[in-house]
Structure formats: structure tokens, C-alpha cells
Image (cartoon, rainbow, N blue to C red):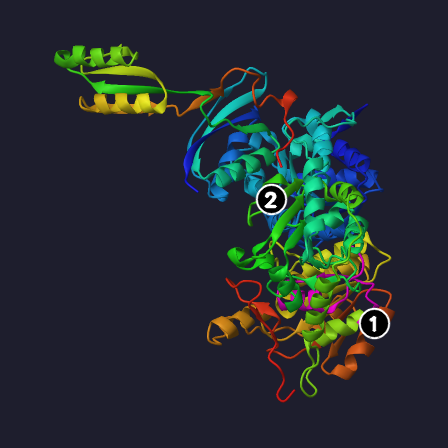
Amino acid sequence: MKLTGAQVLCQSLIEEGVEVIFGYPGGVVLPLYDTLPQYPQLRHILVRHEQGAAHAADGYARVTGKVGVCLATSGPGATNLVTGVANAFLDSSPVVAITGQVARHLIGRDAFQEIDITGITLPMTKHNYLVLDTGLLARTVKEAFHLARTGRPGPILIDIPRDVFEEKVEFHYPSQVDLPGYKPTVTGNPLQIKRAARLIAEAEKPLILAGRGIMISGACEELAALARAQQIPVVTTLLGIGCFPEGDELSFGMLGMHGMAYANMAVSQADLIIAIGMRFDDRATGRVNGFAPNARIVHIDIDPAEIGKNVRVDLPIVGDVGAVLKVLNKQLEPAKNMAWFRQLDDWRRKHPLDTDGEGDVLLPQYVIEKIDEVTKGEATIVTGVGQNQMWSAQHYCYNRPNSLVSSGGLGTMGFELPAALGAKIGRPQDTVWCIAGDGGFQMTLQELGTIAQEQAAVKVAILNNGYLGMVRQWQEMFYGKRYVATPITCPDFTKIAEAYCIPALNVKTREEVVPAIKKAMAEPGPFLINFQVEPEENVYPMVAPGAALDEVIEKPKKGGS
Amino acid sequence: MAATKHTLVALVADRPGVLNRMASLFRRRGFNIDSITEGHSEIPNLSRMTIVVDGTATMVEQVRKQLDKIVDVIKVTDITGPDIIARELALFKVKAAPANRSEIMQIVDIFRAGIVDVSQNSVIVEATGDEEKIDSLYELLRGFGIKEMARTGRVALSRGGPPAEKPSVRKKKKN
């Protein structure tokens, strides 16, 4: 039987196990939207801006491990997706973005709402397609999902002209893909793994740097086995948070610009770094030529192009980290580096994080700590970018994989609310907290409308300091306290929430914090709390840009203590 | 580490936009490309590209691996070394009055090049060879006045053996 292109697309999405599409209709995708009701298994969530669709698909993908799907019309619909697609690209998130395109005979003629979206997204997608032959649509969808979710995951964009949606073709969904140019290396080189085992046996101060690749690979247990067999301390990247329980005594938190002082000291002192599923981002390494000066570096990653891209690597292993760790773990002899562990433990005791302000001030760190307490560390935390993100990373104790959802590589303000929506849709049984700053929240707050319409029980905590806080902090520390364009006024966020029929609270004092969080949790639907926090609180510890990781600036000690 | 010229050979799908994907990669990662040529390969629907990159071994390895990540790129091999045949085609439109035509022809003969067009005031010289040969010929012809020049950039194959970049014998990624 012949199907229209729109039906082919829907059937193909169902074949790929898609349940949710975050989208926004428009002219050229009308034939597709008209077809959607024939496929009730595809739940369409109407966002308020296409950027929100891409971020929601990204958040959905990160918490479920499935491919997130977003959909937009041609022209401005497509360009609005771009930030979200770029965000998914830099954080290796499996997203399939579908855009409508003007009809084939109009392509290249600057037709109404025509834009070259495959050209635009070329440097920020793992691959993209413009479907000019309706007969190739099913195969294209098959390839797109395969590419998005395998190897190093990433976003794939499929641009579909309007008349392709309408043209009738024979539907046959391929069972296999044929991509001769795409064969990710899964199994690690056994010789290299053997060498790694030897380096681990020889090391006196080994340290694991764990990234999100571990969670993508589903290798958290293998990681834990490696760490525990050898008593190797584990430090994570921002996106690696959750791959190893932070409550474990072998967990030494996050490294990098706002990493724990003891984590950064550990990197600087280690004689062996085992970097797993991470890519040595500059925010994680600090000044590269001062990075881990005493260590040999083993780098395990599925993307060969990451090996040696940013830091020198002594022993590379290309492969799926789970597959590699399974083999590596079999070759390890139990050993305990207790002296090294005690050293790190001692640093950890001497450099605790401070969450108490002076007197009655409400510190943002305190808010995060209380959300941790009330949710017993079991919530999924979705953050914005900046100070709120760093405090969320530092002060919540993450014990589950993918329990922190954050824009790491692109650093996209406004990611938090739509991504939290996507996370909640993906994991409806989870408590999802969106931790926002007052700046980033104003970038995508229209998605409150989507949250209200879907009755998605996202709990929003705004750490409101009246500044674009992280930029203000840099102005304070590196630009002579000249606060240019960082003081920002806010609407009354509780009134905004109420306008969307979302209950909300203002919190100004420490005493109000826990009751407010509990009230939000008791509410069956969405809830918003505006925390009026200390305006000029800074994120510490900090490694200044261009400094090495051992040059940590810690929070100034309170007077007298 | 010293920068040297490397010859990369890529087998790519013969699809619209492939060159664009590669060019975009060079631009955004700041790789400097000396030349890039593309044409059909011996396999239907696949093109073979020759890319000349000037850079350190580390940088060129990064170029190779990044190119290899492009889905339409089947395989990229760095064939730099003594065991390659590298050629370039050049066309020179040289000013040539009847008086000095024979002198030009002598030079052309020495270089085993050919004259493919003659007009009132100029000749077109066609030459094939490695870059050094083309450069030397250019230096000699320059004295007569070169009105136009077109060079293809390097095309290269490795000597003997199976093609290094055949998809069927795709080597395991070096670690």
C-alpha cells in the first residue's frame, strides 16, 4: 500500500520507538500535522518556541537514553531550533530534529520561509539530510536514528520539503542501515588495555576522571568495579556527575574551574590519570600545559578524534567505555592505594564547601543543599548556566546516573526550563527540579505555558540575585568591579507563574526555605519558588581562566574563624 | 614539531554537499589546506580526494580523524612518504611572439610538457608532474610573461599493494 511522505515519517518514527515529539507547527509542515492524529501513539507536545522543542528533546534524551525528537517548520522555525541543536551537539546528546522545507520546485528561489537549514546546521550536527526523494525518506529516518544513538551520540537533522510530505510512495522500513563511512570502534585494542592494566598496577597515585560517556555507554557499574577493586579515587567532569555515587567515599567530586579544591589538587598530584568518556574541555582542564603535570594519561573514549585533541595522551584506548572497562577490569589485581586515598581524604576534610552566610542572609548554596535534603538526593536536577549551575553541581549530592541535566559544552542560558520539561516527560515518575537563575529563566520562561498545558510537574527554583551572576562575578574579580550590563530587573516571577495557573511562592529568609520546598513537593503539578538570595555571592572554589588547576581560589574565610 | 606537507587521500560518497562538509570542517577547526582535488574513483558512486595539508604530524592526524568522522567520508589515509606517486596538471598561457616561440618550445620539450594551443601572441603549455617540476617550469616561463595560469593541485596514489583506503579492507583504527 502506498503512503504519503508524512505517513512514512510517522510510521518510521514509530518503528524507531518514538513516543514523544516536541514541536511547533507552521506552513510547510501542515501536511505532517494533519497526519499526526492518525498515529495517536506519537504524543505531540506543543512548545512555545522552537528552541524549547530542541532543549526539551535534549533533556528527554539525556534522562531516558532514548533519542529525543523535535519538529519545526521551515525558515524561522528551523533557525529557532539551531541553539538547541548546537547544545545537543556539544554535549553528545542523541536528538533527531525534523524540519519542514519549502516544496522541491521552490528550493533555491528564496521562497517564503525558505532557509538552508542543512547548510546552517552542518557544523553542529553529527550528520544531516535534505530529503529530495520521497522513496528515500524511510531509509533516511532509519539512518538518522542509528547515527544519533550509536557511537558518540549527537543530533541529526532531517529537512523535508512540503511536497515530500504529500507524495505517495510504497512504504518499506529497512531493517538495517548501510553506512560504509560510519563504523564506530566499539572494542578496545586488547594490547592497549593490557598496557593500561599494567600502568594501573604500577601507579601509586592513580585517579579516574569520569565523563558523561560512561553514562551514555551504560558503564556505571564497570566504573564502580574499577574504582573499588583498586581503591582509585574518582573525580568527574560537570557532565560526568552521577556516573559514580557522590556519597561514596571514593568520590572526590567535580574537577575544573569551579571544581572541588581537593579534586583539582588530586589531578595535579596524581601520577596516573585514567580519563574515561570525557574530552578534556578547557573548563575541566584549566591551563593545558599545567594540567596533571606529574601524571601519565590513559584516555578511553569512543571518538578517536578526541584522543590527543586537547591534552597529550600517553595511552589511548578507542572504544565503547563499557566494553573497554569490562575487559580491563578482568585484568586488574586487587590493590589498595591507601596512602593516596588518605591524602585525598585529608584534603577533602580541610576544604569543605561553605553554605552558611553571615547572619541571616539567604545563600543560594543553602537553597540547593535544602533541596538535596528534602528530595533525599533522589531528584533529577536540571540547571541553567552560570552560578546556579555551579552551585547545583557542587551542593547537591548526586547518586544516580543522569540525575544532573546541564548544558556543559555550549553553556546555553535558557536551557533549564524546556530541558526540565523534557526530563519530566521522559521520567514522569521522577521528581524534577529546574534550578534557574533570574537571567536565564527570562530567556525561555514562555515554556511555563507548555508545562502548564501538559501539567508536567516540574518544580522550578529560581535563585534570584538580580544579576547575571556569573558575568558579574567575573566583572568583580577581573574587571575592577565594573558591573556593566549585569544588573537585571525581573518581573514578579510568582505573578508570572500564577498567570500560567502555576502555584508559586516567594522566599526571602532561611526559615522559609524548607517549608517552601516541601510545599512544592506536595503539589501534584508544577510549582515555582522565587528565592531572593544574597545578590553578590560568588562561586568558589575557582580556578581563574588561564590558570592551572592547582591555582585554586577558595572562598574567603569569614572574619575571625 | 616541524610543519611539513602531508598528502591525505580520502574516499568519499559521491553526494551533493560532501565537499561542503569537508570545507566547513577545515574552516571551523582552523586547518590550513594547500590544495584539494576531487574526481571519480574506480568504485561507482565514490570519489577520491587528494588533500594536501601543511602542518605538524599531530595536527594532520587531527585533520585525518575529524575528516573520518564525516559520515559521507568512507576512509581517509595519510599516504605521505616516499612510496607515493603525486602529480599535478598545470596550464600556462604564455606570451609568445613568433620570435621567441622556438625558445619556449625547447623549454617545453625539456620538461616533457606540450603546447596545446597557439595563437597570435600566446601559447598554452600543458605540463604534468610533481610540484617541484611545475614550479621550475613556471619560473622559466615567467621570463616570457605568463598571462594566465591554472593548476589542479596534487593528485596522489600510493605505490603497489592494495589501495590503502578501500572500504572492504578498512583497517582498524590505530590507537
**Up-down: is A453 above or below B73?**
below
Question: Chain for mark 1?
Answer: A
Q: Chain of mark 2?
A: A
Image height check: is A541 above or below A415?
below
In percent of width and height, residue B48 lies at 52, 22
Mark 2 vs mark 1: give the one in front.
2
**Quadrant in which the C terminus of chain A is drawn:** bottom right
> Residue B147 in the image: x percent, y percent?
23, 24
Identity of the residue drawn at 78% across and 74% down: A370
Q: Amino acid at mark 1?
A: Val
Residue ID for mark 1: A374
Q: What label does residue B69 carry, if any?
A: none
Task: Name the image quarter holding the N terminus of chain A.
Answer: top right
The answer for how far apart the CA atoms under marks 2 and 1 are is 39 Å
Residue numbers of the magenta segment: A373-401
Residue A152: tell me if it is visible. no
Tell me the residue at 85%/42% (across/down). A41
- Classify A12 as above or below A553: above
Q: Which residue is denoted by mark 2 in the rendering?
A: A306
Q: Residues within 10 Å of mark 2 (few under 14, many from 20)?
A: many
Is mark 2 in CB contact (under 8 Å) with mark 1? no
**Image spot of residue A301 (x, y percent):** 67, 44
Q: Nearer the viewer, residue A362 or A55?
A: A362
Q: How crowded is the residue under tag 1: few (<14 C-alpha within 10 Å), some, or many (20+)?
A: some
